[in-house]
Image (cartoon, helix red, strand yellow):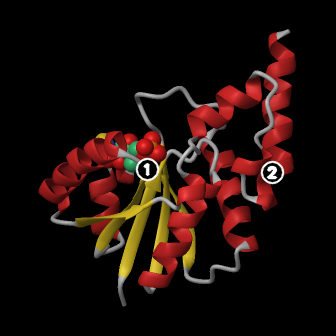
Amino acid sequence: MTVAVCPGSYDPVTLGHLDIIVQASKLFDVVHVAVSKNVLKLPMFDLHTRKKLLEEAVKSSKLKNVQVDLLVGKNSLLADFCKLVKADAIVKGVRDARDFENEFAMSLLNYNLAQVETILLPAKSQNLHISSSYLKNVGINGGSVASMLPEAVCAQVTKEIEKRNFEEL
Ligand code: PNS
């Protein structure tokens, strides 16, 4: 059984994330989508909401070999989680050279910590402009974000972002 881990902050899950999860689910027998805190970013959605949104996106894509997990407690380090689930690889998407630089550095770190390889998949051209950060920035300023979100979570995420927008007024 081949096992992959797709880690990320997923704040919130986008169409770009979902595409990488779909690709990983075709390449591996089991895929763990690992939702993590990112100490460098202030989240909009709490960890449990991010997990729930991912589960809904995964379910609506009918991905039977994908499960969503939280990187918390003693397994909050990705390398430890990879050991726990006996991962063969970490799978991440890359949109550009900046992503590549970050992912390359993290892949070296994770290999050193857990001897786990990282596979980088190129983002689809239609997803190159999508990021959770831009999505939130556009949404909170009144722009439309529906085209960046999985249909299954679009209404929920849009509503939450609009609420934040309203709260700021
Ligand atoms: O979606 P992101 O924010 O680019 O994902 C970054 C993530 C979650 C993969 C990274 O921050 C991570 O691996 N966090 C878990 C804690 C950890 O293992 N830290 C050491 C590597 S940075």
State whether label 1 is within 8 Å of ligand 1: no
Label 1, secondary structure: give it. loop
Which residue is disc 1 drawn over? 95
User: In the figure, 19 relative to 132: above or below?
Assistant: below
Between the C-alphas of marks 1 and 2, the distance is 22 Å
Tell me if 124 is positioned left or right of 50 in this view: left
**Quadrant hosting residue 92:** bottom left
Q: Residue at x 58, y 31 (%)?
A: 43
Q: Residue at x 30, y 71 (%)?
A: 89
Question: Which is nearer the eye, 117 or 46?
Answer: 117
Q: Earlier in the sequence, mark 1 or mark 2?
A: 1
Q: Is residue 88 left or right of residue 19?
A: left
- Percent x, y for residue 137? 66, 26
Q: Nearer the viewer, mark 1 or mark 2?
A: 1
Tell me: is circle 2 under 8 Å from ligand 1: no
Q: Amino acid at mark 2?
A: Cys
Along the viewing direction, whichever of 60 and 79 lies nearer the viewer: 60
Tell me the quarter of the picture where residue 131 sits: top right
When asked about the image quadrant of residue 126, the answer is bottom right
Residue in front for this viewpoint, 135 or 109: 135
- In the displayed structure, 29 sits above or below 73; it is below
Please rate how many residues cluster around mark 2, counting C-alpha atoms within 10 Å: few if below 14, some from 14 to 19, many from 20. some
Pointer 2 residue: 154
Residue 36 picture location, percent across and down: 47, 46
Q: Total of numbered circles in the picture?
A: 2
Q: Are marks 1 and 2 in contact (CB under 8 Å)?
A: no
